[in-house]
Image (tube, rainbow, N blue to C red):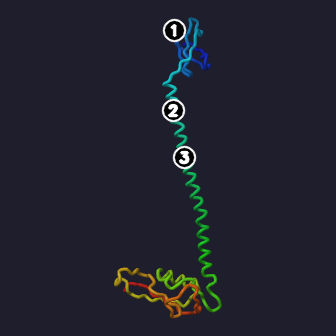
Amino acid sequence: MISLKCPNCNAELSVNEGRDVLYCEYCGHKILLGTKHEFTYTYHEIDEAKIKKHEVHEKIKLKKLDNEYKSKRILLIVGLLCLGYSVLAPLLMSFEYKSSINKYENSISGESIAVPFSSSDLTSEKYEVARTELENVGFTNITYIPINDFGILEAVVEGKVSEVSIDGKNSFKAGQRFPINAPVIIRYHSAK
């Protein structure tokens, strides 16, 4: 076994004794060997298949890197969206809570209450929700009366408000004022 260097790329090469021709495994140079293992002639041979294979390999590597970059970018965007939601959601809920407090803030003035909703707004709610809304405004004299019509009318939802009356009035508008101790009656659909 003889060791020599490629005259083109200076790579260390090994060749079996008795060979006259050697190709550099790194750059593809054709090396003709003389009797004293010296170079007599060098010539550069291009192996198109190896070049094409290398190009394809490089393209595959670039495609993998591009896909990894896209995946990481998507994960980053999703992470930022989640982070944004986790920051904004409490702020929005806080704003909603403050606005619901502000809805009732100016309703009590002296001995009267201005209701911030109409009677028809309450008929779309369950009676527990209507009670909470009325208590939040400041009413304390609240009575519940079940109608016992559930099952007679198929379209009726159990617990849904049928009618709300304040101080004997079952039709009122938002902003209308009532005495603080006015009787409030909530009639709701219920089972017999």
- Residue flagged by tag 2: what amino acid is it? His
Residue 113 lies, in percent from the top left, at 60, 88
Quadrant into which the C terminus falls: bottom left
Q: Earlier in the sequence, mark 3 or mark 1?
A: 1
Q: Position of residue 41 (x, y in %)?
A: 58, 10
Question: Is label 3 or label 1 in front?
Answer: 3
Disc 3 target residue: 70
The span from disc 3 to disc 1 (Cα, nearest Å) is 55 Å
Q: At 49% from the left edge and 29% from the top edge, which residue is drawn?
A: 53
Decide which of tag 2 and tag 3 comes sooner along the chain. Answer: 2
Q: Is residue 119 above or below residue 49?
A: below
* Residue carrying label 1: 18
Crowd tier of the residue under label 2, counting other residues whose Cα lies within 10 Å: few below 14, some 14–19, many 20 or above: few
Q: CA distance from mark 2 to mark 1?
A: 36 Å
The amino acid type, in three-letter code, at marker 3 is: Lys
Query: What amino acid is at disc 1?
Result: Gly
Q: Secondary structure at mark 3?
A: helix
Q: Residue furthest top?
A: 35
Q: Position of residue 16 (x, y in %)?
A: 52, 12
Tell me what residue is drawn at x 58 percent, y 84 percent. Answer: 137
